[in-house]
Amino acid sequence: MGKVKVLVPEYLKDFTCIGSNCEETCCKNWNITVDKETYKKYKKLKDNIFHPLKDNKVIKNKKSISDEDYAIINLDNKNGNSCPFLNEDLLCNIYINLGEDYMCDTCKTYPRHFNSVDDELEMSLTPSCPEAARKILYSPNGICFEHIELDYQKYMNYKKRIYTKGRFVSKNAHKYFWNIRIASITILQNRNIDIVSRLTFLGILYKKVNALIKQKNYQLIDDEIIKFVNTLENLNDNSLLDSLSENKFQQALLCKEIILSLENISLKNKDSSISIFINSTIDFFKNDKDDNTLLNEYNFVIKNKIRPFFDSDIGSMMIENYLVNKYFLDLMPFTYPDDIWKSLIVLCGDYFIIKSLMFGIAKDNDSIKKEDFFNIVRAVSRSLAHNSNYYHYLIQNIENWELNTLGGMYTLINN
């Protein structure tokens, strides 16, 4: 096998699966797809004591749309929706009995995530894996990137792909991908300002760039980015945000509506870890107190418990690292090829969901601890971000609430 050049966050070189020592299992509650090549390997196996196709543990996927999801593993409903190949020591029987070559691409890859930019691979980790979350969130100097060389493996299939140059460029705005990406990550990692200001400044930039894209004035994008970044570097205060106003009552109502809707669409049933946080927040809004009392208590918790965590060095570092990793992993700002504004909605939406779930903890405790934030990020990533309908639902609701504006985003995220 040849070598392949890969762009990765620096934390990745320190990551290894800790197996049965992990507090979580990645072999439970999720659909596990099996690629066609691996399925054929199973078919060719001679009958023996251990055979993956025995007892319909692996079956063909009737909803398959590619060779990557050719078959699926039948989860064991009698054992908490666990993979039937998971032994009592939480280790993989396929790996133990047949070796790594017989593991499906899904299991070989997770929690690694691949994208492609101009035919160059990018790899990052998803924080639904506890050990990956530790590497991501606890990077003290922020997330930095480097090129490394890896032995090419066939499972290195990219989730998203973009071309920024040459005849394959599908969108004119994609030519400016790197400049927008570098400016965006620079803003998100600017520790001279708080997280809400960073996201809001990112929104101001995206509003300007999105307008140029819609006007097809692509040639002006670079100048707009340079001008805005220079303005931020010379800014001594948050005067750029003076025209924005917050609505604490609307924010509390949004917290209630979003958390209730998470319950109503049964996302919490995917994983019990997030249902704990959802139910704790819901309990606050389901009591019989009048709106003014609820609002005062909500604002008290935000101001005195959640805000201090986000303003602390550890809290600010953790949310920054989460957002930067999310930005890189989702190939922002062109997660949605035609609209960079949707990338901002996703970042702000995730921030708001995390903050809302933190509320359920904070209301019953004196403060938020880093372990609380760590557990919520894992739960959000595991139960929501891995659900294909979640971000569609999030964007749709924010648009329905007419919050898909800069002012709306500010209302959503401002503490």
Image (spheres, rainbow, N blue to C red):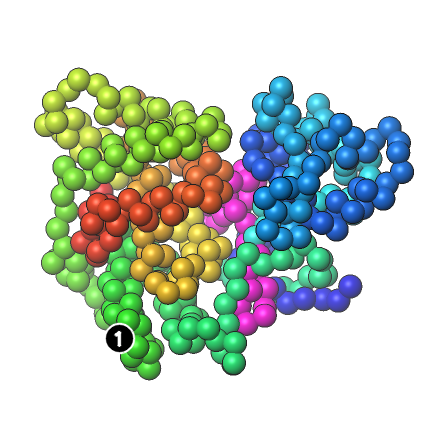
Q: Which residues are magenta?
A: 114-141
Q: Is residue 105 at all visible to an observer of this figure? A: no
Judge whether residue 86 is colored magenta. Answer: no
Rendered view: 18 above or below 337: above
Quick one: label 1, few (<14), some, or many (20+) residues within 10 Å? few
Residue closest to the eye, 37 or 139: 37
* Total numbered circles: 1
Left or right of 181 on screen, residue 7: right
Q: Is residue 178 at all visible to an observer of this figure? A: yes
Left or right of 126 on screen, residue 228: left
Mark 1: amino acid: Gln
Residue under label 1, please give it.
Answer: 215
- Which corner quadrant holds the C terminus? top left
| Residue 207 placement (x, y as % from top left) | 25, 64
Residue at image position (71%, 23%) is 88
Residue at image position (21%, 19%) is 287
Judge whether residue 120 is colored magenta. Answer: yes
| Residue 381 placement (x, y as % from top left) | 46, 41
> Residue 296 sits in which quadrant?
top left
- Which corner quadrant holds the N terminus? bottom right
Rendered view: 221 above or below 185: below
Residue at image position (78%, 44%) is 102
Residue closest to the eye, 286 or 185: 286
